[in-house]
Amino acid sequence: MGGRRSPWRPWPAGAYHHLMPTTTLPPAFFGTSLGSMHQTDSLAAMRSMPGHSVQLVCTSPPFALRCPKPYGNPAESEYVAWFRPFATEIARLLTPEGSFVLDVGAGWQQGRPCRSLYPYEVLLMCCRELGLHLAQELTWWNPATIAAGYWTNHTKERLKDAAHHLWWLAKGERPKADVRRVRWPYRRHMRSLLQHGRRGRKSPGGHDNRYFRAGNGGAIPHNLIALAHEGGSSPYLRACRAAGIAPHPARFPEALPRFFIRLLTDPGDLVLDPFAGSCTTGRAAERLGRRWLCLEREEDYLRGGALRFQARNEPARHRTRYEIFHPEAGIILGSGQ
Ligand SMILES: C[S@@+](CC[C@H](N)C(=O)[O-])C[C@H]1O[C@@H](n2cnc3c(N)ncnc32)[C@H](O)[C@@H]1O
């Protein structure tokens, strides 16, 4: 990693010019030869950036939560009006083949077991008003979610809230994307089919078997991302503890932005996170050799974010599979109600 500096001292103004040809971003808080993080209001910062300059925006803005986080959360009733100017700038900054991956989780409406609708209102606003396209919706399932919340745990009327929608939006209809970069390993069944071949050109569902017979070097993943949050022994948390810094309370697991960066960008492309928090997206981009720009209002989160870049590169120790049950598994094994 080139040009490592102390995270505590701002970089001199101009240090990021090779990344982003603008003079109005504040000095970088921390940077590398590939990217920089800035303490700033991202709306103002994005307005100063040239259009068509960003290949991927991967971000998670503050949600409209019932129990607000310390960094502040917009009210549900004002959410779309609050988010519209940010989305307008993001749409302007994207290259014609660029993508915008938005994690905007829903909660419950005040005092009712009914879901908030603002994630869908945001999606419609982005597509209908700003002309973005919904390339695909993905679900991020966190298998480690606990049964928290009044309607789930107390009244037992609602299911465990373990999935987020991720909106993959794009400036054009054919954003740059290559699913071969995020392949899963083949399962035994598929390995055997590839080894022994299939009979006939059509599958029972009518699909042309030739595409399957050839083998793709791995399975094309579902639009379901199974990924738990990083545990207490993650290098980021250990670094925060050692430095006496409060960790960011709503972080991405790093594998989440890594998935989209692999899928939607090439090395050297610019990745932006305008609600960067602990700069997980920037760290993921750095590891994959993409340029990156992280914008975050709160200095404390940037302090922790800078530590991400100083933690040693440890071999990933994540699980490769999670267990999920057939919807009737418990009924079959239990009372048969
Ligand atoms: C949900 S958190 C993002 C966490 C991040 N994905 C991570 O992995 O650490 C949203 C962040 O947006 C920041 N934020 C909110 N409004 C902002 C603004 N106008 N400009 C810059 N950052 C902002 C908050 O301080 C908060 O850290």
Image (cartoon, rainbow, N blue to C red):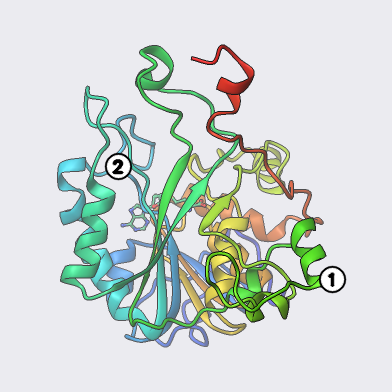
Q: Mark 2 packing: few (<14 Cα in 10 Å), some, or many (20+)?
A: some
Residue 80 image-quadrant placement: bottom left
- The one nearer the camera, 186 or 153, is 186
* Disc 2 residue: CB within 8 Å of ligand 1: no
CB of mark 2 within 8 Å of CB of mark 1? Answer: no
At a point 23% along the width and 44% down the height, the residue shown is 117
Regarding residue 23, the answer to whether it shows in the image is: no
Regarding residue 304, the answer to whether it shows in the image is: yes
Q: Secondary structure at mark 2?
A: loop
- The one nearer the camera, 91 or 51, is 91
At a point 74% along the width and 63% down the height, the residue shown is 190
Residue 326 image-quadrant placement: top right
Q: CA distance from mark 2 to mark 1?
A: 53 Å
- The image shows residue 3 at horizontal and vertical percentages of 68, 76
- The image shows residue 203 at horizontal and vertical percentages of 60, 69
187 to the left or right of 294: right
Label of residue 195 in the image? 1
- The image shows residue 250 at horizontal and vertical percentages of 48, 43
Q: Secondary structure at mark 1?
A: helix
Mark count: 2
Label of residue 73 in the image? 2
